[in-house]
Image (cartoon, rainbow, N blue to C red):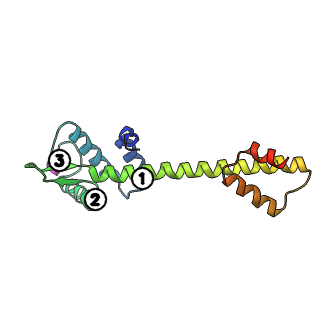
Amino acid sequence: MDQLLEAVDLRYLLLDNYKKMGLDENHLAALLLIDQLLHQGTLLVTADLLGLKMSLPLEAIDAVLVDLLNHDLIEYDNSGNQMKTTLNPLKRKLYSEFQLSIVKRSEENAREDFANQVSNIYGIIEKEWGRTLTPLEFGRIREWISFGYTDQMIVDALH
């Protein structure tokens, strides 16, 4: 899963989730600029440096940086002998959200597949038997499907 996350573009995830994270467009612009500056080799991103690239007043940029720190989306790392800016907290949150969305989508697909399989089996059996299934029969068939038996295995067993 980690390789998959590395292949996912941080900017895409940020653009897709910034509103859900309670951020506005000023936060978004600042994060995108910080990411760009870090990719260009800048170690420490300050309000003054962002002020050269943004149209916001310096006080507003400073407030945005404070918000980003308070939301635990950026951090200033003093390990080693140099202070540097990192987006590691943001990356962790976005990648976690991405993983949750994949799991949720997978669960939804599994539920949908299960419902389709159940509906398909019910239709086949009701047609074969020429009657509506009883609640007990419905329950038994659902149980078999949940155990992993295929449509064909169930139909063969019922024949």
Q: Residue at x 29, y 55 (%)?
A: 73
Amino acid beneath label 1? Glu
Q: Are marks 3 and 1 in contact (CB under 8 Å)?
A: no
Furthest-left residue in view?
A: 81
Furthest-right residue in view?
A: 130
Residues rendered magenta in the picture: 45-49
Name the magenta segment's main secondary structure.
helix
Q: Position of residue 142 (x, y in %)?
A: 72, 56
Residue on which disc 1 sits: 97
Q: Nearer the viewer, residue 68 or 81?
A: 81
Q: Is residue 63 magenta?
A: no
Amino acid beneath label 3? Val
Residue 69: image quadrant is bottom left
Q: First in sequence: mark 3 or mark 1? A: 3
Q: Are marks 3 and 2 in contact (CB under 8 Å)?
A: no
Q: Residues within 10 Å of mark 2 (few under 14, many from 20)?
A: some
Residue 25 showing in the rendered view? yes
Residue on which disc 3 sits: 45
In this rendering, the count of numbered labels is: 3
> Alpha-carbon distance for marks 3 and 2?
16 Å
> Alpha-carbon distance for marks 1 and 2?
15 Å
